[in-house]
Amino acid sequence: MSSASYRAVFALPRARALFLTGLPARLCYGLLSIPMLLAVRAGTGSYAVAGTAVGLAGLATALLGPLRARLVERRPGALRPMAGCYALLLLLLAAVCTERQPTALVVAVAVLAGACPPPVGPLLRTAWGRLAADEAQRQSMLSLDTATESTVFALGPVLAGVLIAVSSAATVLVVCAVLALVGFGLLPGALRAVPGNVEVRPGRQRTPLLAAGFVPLLGLVLAVAAALSLVEVAMLAAWGTVTTGVLTTLFSIGGVIGGLLYGRLGLPGELTRRPLLLVAAATACYALPALLRGSPAAALGLLLAGGVTDVLLITAYQLVELLVPSGSRTEAGAWVNTAYNLGAAAGASLGGLLVDHAGPLGTLGAPAALLVVAVLATAPAVLRRRRAERDATA
């Protein structure tokens, strides 16, 4: 299926405003990880404490993401207060790190900040779904959205490093707070202007986890994120930080290119089967470094895997529109993000254990093996759903 051109997408009413208002909030999240780590390190004098604080903050962000999305989806007026609370916590974190307050206080503020970030990606993707006239436009919109998000998160750490070099980590936390206030100050107006806004009555919507086919989709998203973390740990142990940094950058580049190509050209076949086929393709990508055991093979494999992974995420966002009832789609989009983040964390932990027991080169085979298991575990549910759909239309 081919998609609409990106020029046609931006020509839609409210599309440009919606795209631009989301950028400050996304940039805030893209910048945040390095200054938070370094600010907590400066405030506590310990990298171990800083790493623990940032890890716990990330876990809070991932686990509570669907709850924050549900709150904003059902009570849109909560978005600005949530953003204000988040910005205040970032400012407080900058202050306590500068003044060298007790370690427990610094960690607590960091974790609270991780629990509060408002959902920007899920809100925007739900709005794209309402704005699109057909599936072709929706695919192009979601592809552009995902490519933008990938670019921001790839360039954010670089920009954060430059800003820290000319100022301080605490100052960059203040910049992040300002970006959050600006972005989420403008976003509600842009969202209200999107036609087809859905009125959600509190307590009437089921969790999207009960939607048929949604949990297996989350399992595939979790698996591809874990595969990336596994291969990153293996590459770090085998080839060092410089090579791993280059290879990880290739993954990001492949993701942006693959996502944009998918949005413009599309893929043949049924949308419901596409995640399984994409994870099978990712298996082949990760098999390259496992079989050839060299950085050139890893470079090609990660470039291709980046493209496949971003297309899988875009497909997951498309399936949210198909599988999940209106009124719960923002929460469902947050569950996709949570699955990816939890998979990345689990893959990093598993990768460390495997490197200790099987060695770096032995661990390179783990991502492909994990994805094979994910495909085999998910395929029966997908096939049952397809049969049920055929029987229903027969």
Image: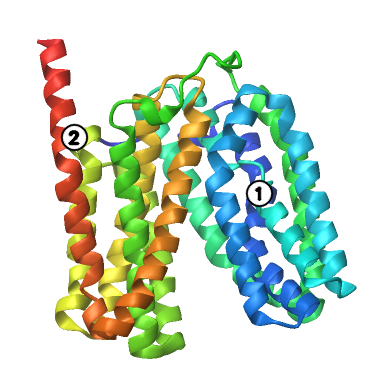
Q: Residues within 10 Å of mark 1 (few under 14, many from 20)?
A: many
**Image check: 230 left or right of 380?**
right
The x and y percentages for residue 89 are: 79, 53
The residue at 51%/35% (across/down) is 125
Q: With respect to residue 157, does 358 lie above or below? A: below
Q: With respect to residue 135, does 92 lie above or below? A: below
The x and y percentages for residue 9 are: 48, 34
**Image check: 266 left or right of 4?**
left
Tags 2 and 1 touching, CB below 8 Å: no
Pick whichever, 188 or 85, lies toward us.
Answer: 85
Q: With respect to residue 388, does 174 lie above or below? A: below
Q: Quadrant of residue 250?
A: bottom left
**Image check: 293 left or right of 192?**
left
Inspect this view and state whether residue 285 appears: no
Report, in whole angstroms, how far the alpha carbon at label 2 lies from the one at label 1.
Answer: 33 Å
Q: Hey, what amino acid is under mark 2?
A: Ala
Q: Which residue of the protein is positioned furthest toward the right in this rendering?
A: 99
Pick whichever, 176 or 127, lies toward us.
Answer: 176
Q: In the picture, which quadrant includes the N terminus?
A: top left
The x and y percentages for residue 131 are: 51, 25
Callout 1: helix, strand or loop? helix
Pick whichever, 353 or 377, lies toward us.
Answer: 353
The x and y percentages for residue 20 are: 65, 43
Residue 115 — which label? 1
Residue for badge 2: 381
Pick whichever, 343 or 174, lies toward us.
Answer: 343
The residue at 51%/20% (across/down) is 327
